[in-house]
């Protein structure tokens, strides 16, 4: 499996997010939805990002619509909603990344999560 720093994703604004640019940073990769009961967590994620970004924390949101259609909008709609309602300024990935996730979620989950190691233990899903 490849380390996270070898991956590139498309942001909602169409630009590329090369995770190699974040090498040495702490990445908090979050599966998000703008129309679910946990949507208010955007506020806390943004606060966390603002508090620790200068110390190397990068929060990265990946919209997900596969669980009860809780993020059905376009990139523009999701991005505007997150910014207007929660002031989100951390990177949000695009619908293209969501499409890959919905087509082969397990592959993307492994690609995104397996390089994360905590105290020498890797996730086993």
Image (cartoon, helix red, strand yellow):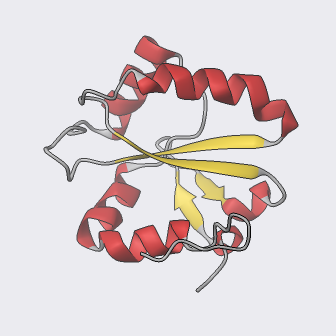
- Vertical position of residue 111 compared to residue 48: above or below: below
Q: Position of residue 39 (x, y in %)?
A: 34, 26
User: Could you tell me how many numbered marks the image carries?
Assistant: 0
Q: Position of residue 117 (x, y in %)?
A: 67, 68
Q: Position of residue 45 (x, y in %)?
A: 55, 29
Q: Residue furthest top?
A: 85
Check the picture and name the quadrant holding the N terminus. Answer: bottom right
Of residues 21 and 116, which is closer to you in this image? Answer: 116
Of residues 31 and 83, which is closer to you in this image? Answer: 31
Residue depicted at x 47% and y 16%: 86
- Position of 64 compared to 7: left or right? left
- Vertical position of residue 24 compared to residue 124: above or below: above
- Position of 79 compared to 23: left or right? left
- Vertical position of residue 124 compared to residue 83: above or below: below
Residue 88 shows up from this direction: no
Q: Position of residue 69 (x, y in %)?
A: 15, 43
Residue depicted at x 72% and y 73%: 120
Of residues 122 and 46, which is closer to you in this image? Answer: 122
Q: Residue furthest bottom?
A: 1
Tell me where residue 114 sits by quadrant.
bottom right
Residue depicted at x 79% and y 51%: 25
Check the picture and name the quadrant holding the C terminus. Answer: bottom left
Residue 55 shows up from this direction: yes
Residue depicted at x 60% and y 56%: 16
- Position of 68 compared to 103: left or right? left
């Amino acid at each position: 499996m490849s380390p996270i720093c070898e991956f590139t994703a498309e942001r909602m604004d169409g630009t590329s997010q090369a995770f190699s640019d974040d090498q040495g940073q702490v990445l908090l990769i979050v599966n998000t939805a703008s129309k679910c009961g946990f949507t208010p967590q955007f506020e806390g994620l943004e606060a966390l990002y603002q508090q620790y970004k200068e110390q190397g924390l990068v929060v990265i949101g990946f919209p997900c619509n596969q669980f009860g259609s809780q993020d059905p909008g376009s990139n523009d709609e999701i991005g505007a909603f997150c910014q207007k309602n929660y002031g989100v300024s951390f990177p949000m990935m695009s619908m293209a990344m969501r499409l890959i996730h919905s087509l082969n979620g397990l592959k993307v989950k492994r690609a995104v999560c397996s390089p994360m190691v905590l105290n020498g233990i890797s996730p086993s899903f």
